[in-house]
Image (spheres, rainbow, N blue to C red):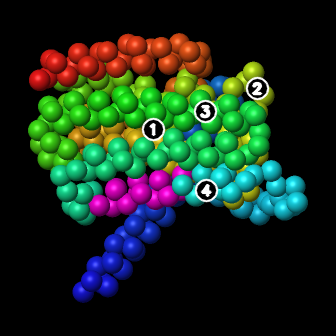
């Protein structure tokens, strides 16, 4: 009985992971298409029907690439960061499976914050282990941005738990609809925080045009780069789903998850990058003060 339950959970997580990764491939293709039409050009349209297999062709090309071992410039810390980021994404997928199988319990939102807290360590290891000064600078910026999200995200989740009466996502999914109308300012702050956590414009501080490099993944290629690239888009999907669950809920979750994914693409296509010091001052001096004020109001 125990073995069958474990096997069932393993297969559920595996198929959910495969489904999410296929969705990530389609999301990458959709983003490139939308960005192309926004910039008055065509996106990928050569590989397969209307470019549907472009993402899979890119994946095959990256997987088949390799580096000569004697010219590797990464340490074990860098590989540990890549594995840790993949582990975080697998944990996100497990949380999705547990939610849809009613196994999350009354602390689902807290477990989500616990898993998200490992992102900063993975980003720091990915950049620090490359022996590259640009990667080091970008990983410090990215890890600090992840800490900023943890501070604002933790305050947001606690505020919503005080309003809803608990950290359980099941009651939230069944009984609370369109809660963003109750706390619209909190919803705006949450969107800013997840843009920073997902390393998306205008808060993609892992890379900068002045450095003319890709950022913390400068020294990566092949399978390692594929993992970093795919994990970024998987985290975007997860946070889109969680945002819909927290602020819309009910049968509207999947619909608004798609809208949040479209929001990420729109931000990348239209918004300019914000100066790093302005962003830090805004998040730590303004947003946190407003959230603390919300605590006194709710209590």
Of the numbered discs 4 and 1, the one sitting upstream in the chain is 4
Q: Residue at x 71, y 37 (%)?
A: 135
Q: Secondary structure at mark 4?
A: helix
| Residue for badge 2 | 211
Q: Which residues are magenta?
A: 85-98
The disc at residue 193 is none
Q: CA distance from mark 3 to mark 4?
A: 17 Å
The disc, 1 or 3, on the residue closer to the chain's N-terminal end is 3
The alpha-carbon separation of the residues under discs 2 and 4 comes to 25 Å
Which picture quadrant has residue 260? top left
Q: Secondary structure at mark 1?
A: helix
Residue 12 location in percent, x, y? Answer: 37, 70
Question: Element under label 2?
Answer: helix
Q: Is residue 99 left or right of residue 229?
A: left
User: Which dot marks residue 80?
Assistant: 4
Which part of the image, by quadrant, shows the C terminus?
A: top left
What residue sits 34% from the left and 19% below the top? Answer: 288
Q: CA distance from mark 1 to mark 3?
A: 26 Å
96 up-or-down from 122: above or below:
below
Identify the image quadrant of the N terminus.
Answer: bottom left
Q: Earlier in the sequence, mark 3 or mark 2?
A: 3
Residue 175 in the magenta stretch? The answer is no
Q: Are marks 2 and 4 in contact (CB under 8 Å)?
A: no
Q: Quick one: label 4, few (<14), some, or many (20+) residues within 10 Å? A: some
């Amino acid at each position: 009985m125990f073995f069958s339950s474990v096997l069932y959970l393993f297969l559920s997580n595996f198929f959910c992971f495969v489904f999410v990764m296929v969705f990530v491939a389609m999301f990458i293709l959709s983003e490139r298409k939308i960005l192309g039409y926004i910039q008055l050009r065509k996106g990928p349209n050569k590989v397969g029907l209307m470019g549907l297999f472009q993402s899979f062709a890119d994946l095959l090309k990256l997987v088949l690439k390799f580096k000569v071992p004697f010219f590797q410039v990464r340490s074990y810390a860098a590989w540990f960061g890549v594995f840790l980021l993949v582990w975080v994404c697998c944990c996100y997928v497990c949380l999705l499976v547990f939610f849809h199988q009613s196994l999350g319990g009354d602390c689902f939102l807290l477990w989500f914050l616990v898993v998200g807290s490992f992102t900063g360590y993975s980003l720091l290891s990915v950049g620090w282990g490359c022996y590259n000064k640009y990667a080091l600078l970008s990983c410090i910026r990215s890890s600090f941005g992840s800490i900023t999200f943890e501070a604002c995200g933790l305050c947001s989740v606690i505020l919503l738990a005080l309003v809803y009466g608990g950290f359980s996502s099941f009651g939230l999914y069944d009984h609370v609809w369109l809660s963003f109308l109750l706390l619209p300012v909190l919803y705006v702050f949450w969107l800013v925080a997840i843009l920073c956590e997902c390393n998306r414009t205008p808060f993609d501080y892992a890379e900068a045009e002045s450095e003319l490099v890709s950022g913390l993944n400068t020294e990566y290629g092949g399978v390692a780069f594929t993992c970093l690239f795919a994990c970024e888009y998987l985290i975007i999907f997860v946070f889109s789903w969680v945002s819909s669950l927290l602020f819309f809920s009910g049968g509207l979750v999947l619909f608004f998850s798609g809208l949040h994914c479209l929001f990420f693409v729109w931000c990348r296509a239209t918004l300019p990058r914000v100066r790093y010091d302005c962003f830090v001052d805004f998040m730590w001096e303004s947003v946190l003060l407003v959230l603390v004020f919300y605590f006194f109001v709710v209590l």
